[in-house]
Amino acid sequence: MEFVVFDDKCWRNFFPITLTRSTGDLRVGILKLRQRIASYFALEETNVIISEKLKDIYQERHSDWQINTLKNIDTIFINSRLKTNEELKKKILSLPENSCLLCGDDILAARFIPEKEEVSTENISSLFENLKEIQIKEDCFWKYIWELISENSDYILHDFKEYFFDKDNYFETETGVTVLNPYNVWIGEGTEIKPGVVIDATEGPVILDENVKIMSNSVIIGPVYIGKKSIIKMGAKIYQGTSVGPVCKIGGEIEETIIQGFSNKQHDGFLGHSYLGEWINLGADTNNSNLKNNYKNVKIYFYPKKEKVDSKCQFLGSIIGDHSKTAINSTINAGAVIGVGCNLFGSDAISDFVPSFSWGMNSKYETYQIDKFFETANLIKQRRNLNLTDNEKELYTKISQQNF
């Protein structure tokens, strides 16, 4: 039996974050969506169907993955947007041959022997033709990027119980560190916590992964996850519902926010109810709003419709794509969407929708010259002993040409 995790047409619902990654690589809680599916189904190999635009960089980064290639054997296909639970797992594993599970009009899972050898997100719907349809009524899909923000606290709690509670815990703190409800705290090997730190796990778990550094006088209130090799700066205030991926630097005040990884918000300033990609830098005293003054739902730009929609969220901050930057004292309005590769500065508040590769102030954006972007992006990656590859340059060039 083969298992394949696939991105469907709704990968566009998660732009700009999925302009540069698979839907399955979106983080919520502690894990990424694909990782959670792989754990539930005990998958030993990684077989994925993603956008053709992403295939080359994924093949470059994951040479051992099977990407957009199928075998002529009995295969179960699982949608990467699946909100996995035990009941759905049983339904998927018990699927008859040549059948599919539907939630509304979307394929949740399918089982058959594929005839095609190559496929991508762009043409995957043709794979599922002429299958027996089994409809289920429960809501089992992630539909929008802001849903991940809203449910992040619940998933940190879930993942802590499932994957960390019984895992080897290197719980050891210096004199002067205050820990409330230590049974709800997991500390990875090599993690360093300086005196004056307060970890409050009364209302939810706090997970500090391997080789994390927490500087003095920081306060962390769970549920919170801090990823491997990340640094929490002196005096930081990390509130509930925050997931920080690997190799980040975090300071100031942050709550109900997901950061994919490799990003810096290391100075004072507030970041709330937001979703950030990778290689992002927020300048000192960058602040975002996460609540409108009239307390109404926040409207947000939605790529598939090319217009703002009602998020149905009273609290919603900003969505920021990979490699975007803000200068010191930047202000970001509630519901702002900032694309990939932007460099933003000036006294005007950043609001509404900022297309990828925008440069300048809100009142007058110019196009960020792609060669200048490559130069800066490569310098940033070199600080992590990495380089901007030709495949990455090709992807970013396509994004810049499509006004995303």
Image (cartoon, helix red, strand yellow):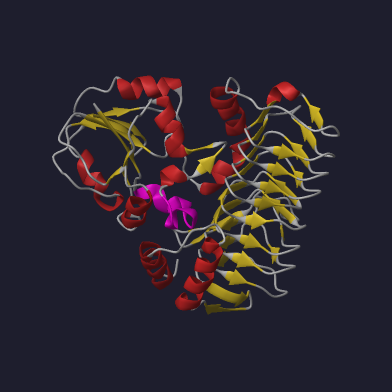
Residue 53, position as x, y percentages in the image: 33, 58
Residue 102, position as x, y percentages in the image: 33, 33
Residue drawn where x is 42% and y is 38% of the image:
34
Residue 46, position as x, y percentages in the image: 34, 37
For the record, the magenta segment spans: 9-21
Horizontal side of residue 239 vs 106, given as left or right? right
Asked which quadrant contains residue 219, the reply is top right
Q: Is residue 291 visible?
A: no
Residue 11, position as x, y percentages in the image: 40, 50
Horizontal side of residue 37 vs 309, given as left or right? left
Q: Does the magenta stretch include residue 183?
A: no
Q: Quadrant of the N terminus?
A: top left
Q: Quadrant of the C terminus?
A: bottom left
Name the residue nearer the viewer: 352 or 149.
149
Give above or below for 4 relative to 356.
above
Give above or below for 371 relative to 16.
below
Give above or below for 136 relative to 22.
above
Horizontal side of residue 225 vs 129, given as left or right? right
Residue drawn where x is 79% and y is 49% of the image:
234
